[in-house]
Every structure is written in structure tokens, then in C-alpha cells.
Image: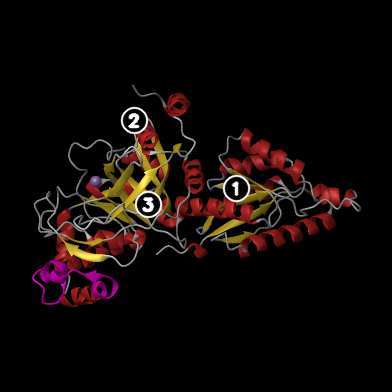
């Protein structure tokens, strides 16, 4: 459901009239070649669309205004091939409401040492033209990503790809709708937040719906629809014997399928990009949605358990960033520890709702009692997660602002099989290690729920946080607690000066 090729970024070259028509024609030809190469680059998942060279204040303003209203435009890549006096950009950039990447490149990679003359100098001026551009972006306090290097370099293209993934997720949030069935789990603090300030800052809306509406839709599901979905389960997963045809718990599987069909219908009809539920409010539902939540996530929907709408929206954002990349993305919870001092581990999981996009091998479908919630035993997919690097990302509300926290982790194989654990799981080592990683997380106030991804990188989240105007606390191999505590107290002042202090 996420196709980044439908989205585009605009390639905008700054210049001025001073150079005369012949030089400007060359500027346009060169810029068009750069834009085409970026469009063709495998590291950039969106289309890169060449725009006419900007030579005047009117053109700069029109460009920014058009970008604002173009429905598929994620943002601008700007580059000053020649000198573009920056006062001409002020009115346009003041109005720009989409992300900007400042590509500091040069058409010619190498200096032609033996032939260089003033014609070359006139056409390869980014070294000073982009400094003028950088000044006005800084003067306007405009948040942007600066990328330096030759446009044919893979690393440069990869940075643009990363930025465009973040911009796609940001674009996806604007006007997005998330549905909640039931409120937050009672007395839980971290899953709360300010939905109005979230909509103001992030562009998405969160609204509640009666679980009765869901129940009604689930009841309307036909036997034929259930048959079809159960056949899909049989084709995609290995079913526990009791769930197979003729098995004693076959009816549980059919009930799970009924819930999935009903949920999909509600999400589709309401054009929702994600949803939350809570085990404390399931009146009329036979089971807590398990396999339904898992499979909907695999299709790109955000999900948050216990009414956690912030993590739901975050899971959706990471799904968009990760579109087409190797590695999955899931709702996650730091569940339990292996506190062996030689190698301390986190076992991440949830009661049910882990996305099979992170599964190693074919998931198995199982049914087990839950222990809380007082409902029938829910059907769920059970699997392990393949080893490799991953991130855990959390979004919390600090009273005067939202804070994003990221921990880089290494997923490892479980030390031994977990034959009795009836949930999907991932085992990881937080960076730099569990002691420092978890301490840093606790100092920063990160939640137990996260968006977990083996596809999304720290750089994507960094770019995304900048677009969203979010404080970002990164916990990685370089994290030192003393320094982190200082960073948190400095941020308190920096963000307090912007948005007020909270005591
Ligand atoms: Mn939870």
C-alpha cells in the first residue's frame, strides 16, 4: 500500500540573469542531466523531477508556492550551479512548507587543470554559489539537510534517497487519519499525549470510535469471506494441528479471520492509515485481535496496542520510510531481559501484535490463552527475527513538546530455542550495551512501546525528526551517559525557550 514511485522531489537550480542566455542554457542543460541521473539512481526511491532554473525573485516565489500545493511533491532539492543572489529566495523560502535538501555538488567532478579558463569558472560556481544559498537558509532558520559531494557518487545519491524516504513519511502523515478503538490502557502515562498538538505539529489526526462499531462490522462478515481468508492463512503459514481443518480449535481460527475481515473493511472505508485497540475495551469481540493486527501491519498499517496512538503513527511512518527495502518494521515492546553480565540481551515482543515482516522463515499460526483481558484465546503468528542491525524508535510527550528517542540495536539469534513462548519475538543487544543503552533510554524517558525496524536507519530518523521539528535523542555506539545527561538538560533549555518550560 506504499508505492514511493508515485511520489516526486523537485530538482531546483538557482542562478540569475547576469550570465546571459548562452550560459543559462548550459546551466539548464547541465541541471537537467543531474536531475535525470538522480531520477535513474537506484538509491533514490522516488522520482526526481527537473524544474526550470530559478533566475529571479518571482521565479523563486512561484517555485516554492507550486511545490506547496503539488500533491505528489515531497520537497525540494536545491543547488546553485552558478551564483544565485539569495535575497531573491527570501519570499519563496518563507512560504515553503515542504522539506528541503541542499545538494552541494558541482557539474564537473574534476578540475580540468590544464584547460581551466574563465568559462569553466563561470559554470562551476557551487563552491561560492551554494555558500550564498546556505547563508539565506540559515538566516531564515530553515531546517534542511545538506549533502556534499559529486552527484554521480553513490554515497551522495544514497543520502538523497534517505532524505526522500523521510520526506515521503512526513508527506504521508499530512492529513493521515488514525482510528482508536477504546482509550489508552488505564493509568498508563507514556501512551498518553496531546492529540491537538500532535495534529498541529505532525499533520495527522487521531479519533476514537466505539468498539461497538467494530463489532457490528465484524458480525456482518460472511462465511464466504471467512473461508477465503482462512485459505490464505493455510497457504501462507503453518497451522498448529488444533487449528487445521477438523481440529478442535478450528472455530478460533475462523473467529480470528472474521475479525480481520471486519477490521480491514473499517480501515478501508474510513481511509485510515493505522489503528489502536486496548484489551480493556473489547466488549462484543470474541478475541483480542492478534493475527489481524499482525497482518494489517505487514500491509503497511500503523498499529499501537493499549491505545498507543503515538506509536501507531510512528510505525506507519517507519513503514513508509522502509518501503521496498530489505528488512521488516513492527510495533514492538521491550519485554524481558537476559541479564547475564557477559552478554546482556533484551527479548522484545508483545502479547500478540508483532508484524510478520520481521519474521525469519514461515510463521506458525497458534492459539493460546492470554492471561489478561478475559477473552477467548486469541490466534497469533509466532516467529523469530533474523539477526542484524535494527533501530527502536519512541515518541513521548514531555508536557511542552514531543521528544523522539532512537536506540541502535543488534538483533541476535536466541541463545536457545523458546518452545514454550507463544508469541513472535526479537532478541537484541542495545548499543553500546544493555547497561548504557537502557540507562540512556530511561534518562530520556523513552517508552516501553517502540517502532522497531531492520530497514530504517538512524539517518532516516534524523532527517524525519528535522522535518517534524522534533527533539531527537540518539543512543548508539558512541553514547556516554554523562554526555547524554548534559544533552538532555541543554535540550530542556533550547526547547523551553521555543515552547515554554514545564515544571
Ligand atoms: Mn504493551
Q: Quadrant of the C terminus?
A: top left
Q: CA distance from mark 2 to mark 1?
A: 31 Å
- List x then y, in percent, for residue 175: 40, 52
**Number of numbered markers:** 3
Label 1 crowd (10 A; few <14 / some 14-19 / many >=20):
many
Residue, disc 3: 412
Q: CA distance from mark 1 to mark 3?
A: 35 Å
The secondary element bearing badge 1 is classed as strand
The answer to whether any part of residue 66 appears in the image is no
Label 3 crowd (10 A; few <14 / some 14-19 / many >=20):
some
Which corner quadrant of the image does residue 488 belong to?
A: top left
Residue at left 70%, top 42%?
A: 88
Mark with earlier residue (2, 1): 1
Q: Which residues are magenta?
A: 232-254
Does label 3 point to a residue whose CB lies under 8 Å from ligand 1?
Answer: no
Does label 2 point to a residue whose CB lies under 8 Å from ligand 1?
Answer: no
Q: Nearer the viewer, residue 8 or 445?
A: 445
- List x then y, in percent, for residue 299: 35, 63
Residue, disc 2: 399
* Residue 401 shown left or right of residue 33 in the figure: left
Q: Nearer the viewer, mark 1 or mark 3?
A: 3
Q: Nearer the viewer, residue 71 or 109?
A: 109
Residue 101 is tagged as 1
Q: Is residue 160 above or below residue 268?
A: above
- List x then y, in percent, for residue 24: 79, 55
The secondary element bearing badge 3 is classed as strand
Which corner quadrant of the image does residue 447 belong to?
A: top left
Q: Is residue 472 above or below residue 17?
A: above
The secondary element bearing badge 2 is classed as loop
Residue at left 64%, top 55%?
A: 11
Q: CA distance from mark 2 to mark 3?
A: 36 Å
Mark with earlier residue (1, 3): 1
Amino acid at each position: 500500500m506504499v508505492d514511493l514511485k508515485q511520489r516526486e522531489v523537485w530538482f531546483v537550480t538557482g542562478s540569475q540573469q547576469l550570465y546571459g542566455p548562452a550560459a543559462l542554457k548550459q546551466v539548464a542543460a547541465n541541471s537537467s542531466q543531474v536531475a535525470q541521473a538522480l531520477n535513474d539512481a537506484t538509491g533514490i526511491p522516488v522520482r526526481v523531477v527537473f524544474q526550470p532554473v530559478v533566475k529571479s525573485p518571482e521565479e523563486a516565489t512561484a517555485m516554492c508556492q507550486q511545490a506547496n500545493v503539488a500533491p505528489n511533491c515531497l520537497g525540494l532539492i536545491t543547488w546553485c550551479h552558478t551564483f544565485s543572489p539569495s535575497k531573491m529566495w527570501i519570499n519563496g523560502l518563507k512560504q515553503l512548507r515542504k522539506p528541503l535538501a541542499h545538494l552541494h555538488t558541482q557539474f564537473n567532478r574534476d578540475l580540468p587543470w590544464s584547460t581551466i579558463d574563465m568559462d569553466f569558472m563561470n559554470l562551476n560556481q557551487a563552491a561560492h554559489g551554494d555558500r550564498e544559498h546556505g547563508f539565506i537558509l540559515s538566516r531564515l532558520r530553515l531546517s534542511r539537510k545538506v549533502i556534499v559531494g559529486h552527484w554521480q557518487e553513490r554515497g551522495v545519491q544514497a543520502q538523497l534517497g534517505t532524505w526522500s524516504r523521510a520526506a515521503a513519511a512526513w508527506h504521508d502523515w499530512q492529513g493521515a487519519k488514525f482510528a482508536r478503538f477504546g482509550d489508552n490502557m488505564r493509568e498508563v502515562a507514556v501512551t498518553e499525549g496531546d492529540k491537538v498538538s500532535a495534529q498541529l505539529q505532525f499533520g495527522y489526526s487521531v479519533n476514537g470510535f466505539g468498539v461497538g462499531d467494530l463489532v457490528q462490522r465484524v458480525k456482518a462478515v460472511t462465511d464466504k469471506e471467512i473461508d477465503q481468508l482462512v485459505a490464505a492463512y493455510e497457504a501462507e503459514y503453518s497451522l498448529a494441528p488444533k487449528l487445521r481443518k477438523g481440529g478442535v480449535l478450528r472455530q478460533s481460527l475462523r473467529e480470528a479471520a472474521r475479525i480481520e475481515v471486519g477490521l480491514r473493511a473499517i480501515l478501508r472505508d474510513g481511509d485510515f492509515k493505522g489503528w489502536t485497540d486496548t484489551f480493556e475495551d473489547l466488549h462484543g469481540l470474541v478475541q483480542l485481535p492478534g493475527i489481524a493486527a499482525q497482518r494489517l501491519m505487514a500491509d503497511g498499517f500503523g498499529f499501537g496496542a493499549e491505545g498507543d496512538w503515538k506509536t501507531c503513527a510512528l510505525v506507519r511512518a517507519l513503514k513508509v520510510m522502509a518501503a521496498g527495502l530489505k528488512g521488516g518494521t513492527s510495533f514492538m515492546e521491550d519485554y524481558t531481559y537476559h541479564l547475564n553480565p557477559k552478554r546482556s540481551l533484551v527479548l522484545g515482543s508483545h502479547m500478540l501484535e508483532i508484524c510478520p515482516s520481521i519474521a525469519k522463515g514461515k510463521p506458525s499460526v497458534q492459539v493460546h490463552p492470554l492471561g489478561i483481558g478475559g477473552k477467548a484465546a486469541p490466534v497469533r503468528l509466532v516467529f523469530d527475527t533474523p539477526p542484524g542491525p535494527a533501530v527502536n524508535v519512541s515518541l513521548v510527550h514531555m508536557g511542552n513538546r514531543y521528544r523522539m528517542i532512537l536506540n541502535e540495536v543488534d538483533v541476535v539469534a536466541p541463545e536457545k530455542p523458546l518452545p514454550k513462548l507463544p508469541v513472535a519475538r526479537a532478541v537484541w543487544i542495545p548499543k553500546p550495551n544493555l547497561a548504557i543503552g537502557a540507562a540512556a533510554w530511561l534518562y530520556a524517558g523513552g517508552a516501553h512501546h517502540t517502532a522497531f525496524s531492520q530497514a530504517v536507519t538512524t539517518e532516516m530518523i534524523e532527517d524525519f525528526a528535522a522535518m517534524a521539528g522534533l527533539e531527537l535523542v540518539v543512543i548508539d555506539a558512541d553514547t556516554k551517559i554523562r554526555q547524554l545527561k548534559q544533552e538532555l538538560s541543554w535540550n530542556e533549555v533550547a526547547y523551553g525557550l521555543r515552547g515554554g518550560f514545564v515544571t
